[in-house]
Amino acid sequence: MPTTQQQTRIPGKRLILTAFTLPVLLGLVWAPSVKAKDVELQVGIIQRLGEENNTEIALSSTKGDILTLSFTDRSGQTQTLQTNQVKLQVVKQPLQAPTFSERVVLGNYSTFETAENSAKEWRAKGIKVEIAQPDRWEVWAKREIYKNPLLRRLLLQSLRARGFNQSYLETEILSEKFQPIFTVNGKRYEPNYLEISAGNDLIQVTALKNNDRIYGGRLRLQPNAYGTFTLVNQVPLETYLRGVVPHEIGHQAPDNAIKAQTIIARTYALRNLRRFQVDNYQLCADVHCQVYYGLSDTNPRADRAIAETQGLVLTYQNELVDALYSSTTGGITARFSDVWNGEERPYLKPVIDSPRQVWNLSQQSLADEAAFRRFIGMKEGFNETGQKVFRWNRKGTLQELNEDLKEYLEKRRHPLADFQTIQRMEITKRSPSGRILTMAIQTDKGILELHKNEIRSCFGTPRSTLFYLEPMYDEKNQLKGYTFIGGGFGHGVGLSQFGSYNLANIGWSAEQILAFYYPGTKLQPLDDSIVFWRDRTLDNVQAQANQF
């Protein structure tokens, strides 16, 4: 069947690069200095304003400056006001008549990566979909296509007739709506849309969950797909990095580790601009994307790394790499498919996380349980040796594991969600990097399987999927829980942040660090020839287009 490939570059913008004659020393490698016309990002810094405990924020100008508020009122007219400070609330208002919100949920997942792969599979079946994140990531039947109750029910009926029983209809009767309000000079306003700017492009935001933070660029309050509102920061890419790099890599990181993190953070941001299309912005400000804290706690060393690597990104065959990274690999990096569903990225492969050979993976695959246990028993010679989460041993009582599993199954509307207790847990399949691919769980209601990153999403005890299990018994030889014995923190794909510390400390350049964690990739200045993201979805498969 023919496939289509969508190539994404900078939406609505061209990038202009200017080369200077003076070079910049990038670690041990000389690279030309580049100046990029900055890309403006749209980052949801408060994603669901209006939810419980998240209904009020204060916006202030910095000393000597003033805020400009541009908004549309309830009649649709555009107004502009100026003030030093404004308190913005999102309140519930009664509707004149109840209405309902309804959508077909085709599946829900712990990560965007797996949700996106599921969306591609649905599109290949001829169903138009969209990806959302009301809590967990979800794939919805596209609302503008399935826009009335009859179409939604026919779709669901057709899905179930073909054996897709995990899809469901989510319906909510609404008697209230969320409405933003603010007051200036004693007058109350109820905007449908609000944009806030300042003369020096610095705005202080005070919210319940993140105290006082200053953001560069502009702010925009806009409705999202869930009936609440999102505060979006429209910020230049290089300014955005000032609020990401020091918080992701840490203030104590060596210079070349900071430079490597900067290039990866820049690449990651540009590669992932599609994540929140359903909500009309691009990135979030937490661990589902990259941690972003604005300009309140910048770092001079991180600022220098951003300036010295300006415009540099990591590519593979002239496409931005999927620049995944984690805190600690546990001694070996993972393939993309070890953690998520989807096609392999050739540059994301198992790499023993050490500057010297401490384990021969071609001769001793960690898919073998005995070899894996020997590997986890090793503690010396790795880049992460000595780090707190490099090796760990954590116990989960049966009660804790039952509660975790029940909550997970209830969120997924799984038919075994009414189980009473776990009777046995067993790892049944590992990848060559040692990551768990399948875990079987015997409950009193039946057997279920958890796969890949869903294991970490389900249970709070393990820090990664790089572990083995030891059952714990009481004095009557009754199962009372499991000990999780493993290594690493996070998914383990791509760069290890703590591993990059060691490589930088022994003299590796940023370019060498990136080549180690992303084999076969190329460091290059961003220009219009580079593809941000290539969609290989079967969007135009006519043979299947009308089956649903």
Image (spheres, helix red, strand yellow):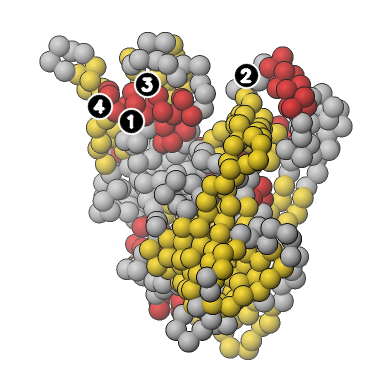
In terms of image quadrants, where is residue 430? top left
Q: Mark 3 points at which residue?
A: 426
Q: Nearer the viewer, residue 353 or 546?
A: 546
Viewer-side label of 4, 1 = 4
> From where the camera sits, is residue 414 visible?
yes
At which x and y percent is residue 146? 76, 33
Query: Which secondary structure, mark 3?
Result: strand
In terms of image quadrants, where is residue 234? bottom right
Callout 3 environment at 10 Å: few (<14), some (14 to 19), or many (20+)?
Answer: some
Q: Mark 2 points at which residue?
A: 165
Three-letter code for the amino acid on which mark 2 is drawn = Asn
Q: Decide: marks 3, 2 in contact (CB < 8 A)?
A: no
At which x and y percent is residue 278? 66, 47
Residue in view at x 82 percent, y 23 percent: 547
Q: Mark 4 points at which residue?
A: 397
Spatial distance from mark 4 to mark 3, Cα to Cα? 16 Å
Residue occupying the far right of the picture: 542
Q: Nearer the viewer, residue 519 or 180?
A: 180
Callout 4 environment at 10 Å: few (<14), some (14 to 19), or many (20+)?
Answer: some
Query: Which secondary structure, mark 4?
Result: strand
Viewer-side label of 3, 2 = 2
Please tell me which of labels 3 and 1 falls first in the chain: 3
Spatial distance from mark 4 to mark 2, Cα to Cα? 32 Å
Q: Decide: marks 4, 2 in contact (CB < 8 A)?
A: no
Callout 1 environment at 10 Å: few (<14), some (14 to 19), or many (20+)?
Answer: many
Q: Which of 201 and 10 is in front in this view?
A: 201
Please tell me which of labels 4 and 2 falls first in the chain: 2
Residue 468 numbered mark, or none: 1
Three-letter code for the amino acid on which mark 3 is drawn = Glu
In this picture, is 68 found above or below 327?
below
